[in-house]
Image (cartoon, rainbow, N blue to C red):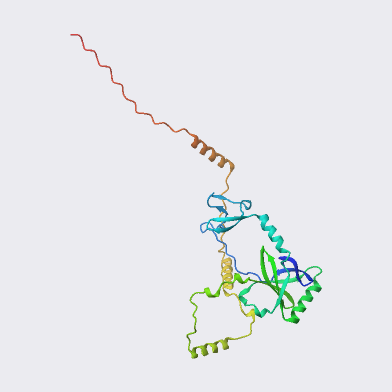
Amino acid sequence: MHTIWKGSISFGLVNIPIKLHAATEDKDIKLRSLHKKCHTPIKYEKICPVCETELAMDDIVKGYEITKGKFIILDESELNELKKATEEKAVEIIDFIKIEEIDPIYFNRSYYMSPNEGGMKAYGLLRKALLETEKAGLAKIIMRSKEQLAIIRVYENTLLMETIHFPDEVRNVGDVPNVPADDQVSKKEIDTAILLIEQLTTKFEPEKYTDEYRTKLMELINSKQVGKQAVTPKEKAPTTNVTDLMAALQASIDKTKPKEEKKAPTRRKKAPAKAKKAQ
């Protein structure tokens, strides 16, 4: 299992070197955007709309928008220094709590924790203590340049860390529009709803549930593959240096060619008047 983070978790004077592994994976089917005409994958470029130039990573800096169109620039060195200063306190368990006290809305992502070198005994100690007390550890950790709250609990004999949102990251439920204040239902209606819920109540068995849309989408893709309906992007026509050179030379000639001046229309000279014959 791929390791995504190395560090240590501490509670009191106990220090546990650990590794983090993603406990879940995104199995969404990734669809690429293609040019309809030639089936070439679309290329997304970072372009400055003012300078109209494509940007490299060295041309990009971080900025915080304080008002519309006005930014505070933050140097990468400043961000790294801030990250380094806070990382030292990032993995300490600060409290122990009952996990039932946390509403599921706070939960974010799950990670398996495995002991790193020299951490086997301390890992087992924390696992046993959490099981005996039926508690979970509440810690802070910095991952991907973001400080996060985390819950450390036991899941099938393995320590599991679940990152949770800070309270100010959970939106105020009072801002949800059109929520009725009172239930305008009859007793017969509520009794019928309760009966239906009881009939559909069962033990949670996660293996029973599958992503039907993903399954049907893969069946569609496989059927097209068997039917040889796959497409190949058109290859870009190669250009030779000779063609490019001739085109550049011709363009240069056309650009530097002097414009023909319009000649003024010539006036015909009048024939000299004939001298009168002497009488």
- For this rendering, which residue is in front, 58 or 99? 99
Residue 96 located left or right of residue 193: right
Task: Please say if 270 is above or below 19.
Answer: above
Q: Is residue 37 above or below residue 13?
A: above
From the top left corner, tell me how far across and down residue 142 is, in percent. 69, 65
Residue positioned 48% across, 89% down in the render? 186
Please state which of residues 80 and 210 is positioned toward the viewer in this rendering: 80
Q: Is residue 78 above or below residue 11?
A: above
Q: Farthest residue toward the top?
A: 279
Q: Residue at x 74, y 65 (%)?
A: 6
Q: Quadrant of residue 224?
A: bottom right
Q: Residue furthest left?
A: 279
What is the quadrant of the C terminus in the image? top left
The number of numbered discs placed on residues in the rendered structure image is: 0
| Quadrant position of the N terminus in the picture | bottom right
Instruction: Please tell me which residue lies in front, 218 or 261.
Output: 261
Image quadrant where residue 246 sits: top right
- Return the x and y of residue 192 as percentages of the image width and height: 51, 89
* Residue 195, position as x, y percentages in the image: 54, 89
Does 87 sit left or right of 234 as displayed?
A: right
Choose top left, top right, bottom left or bottom right for residue 199: bottom right
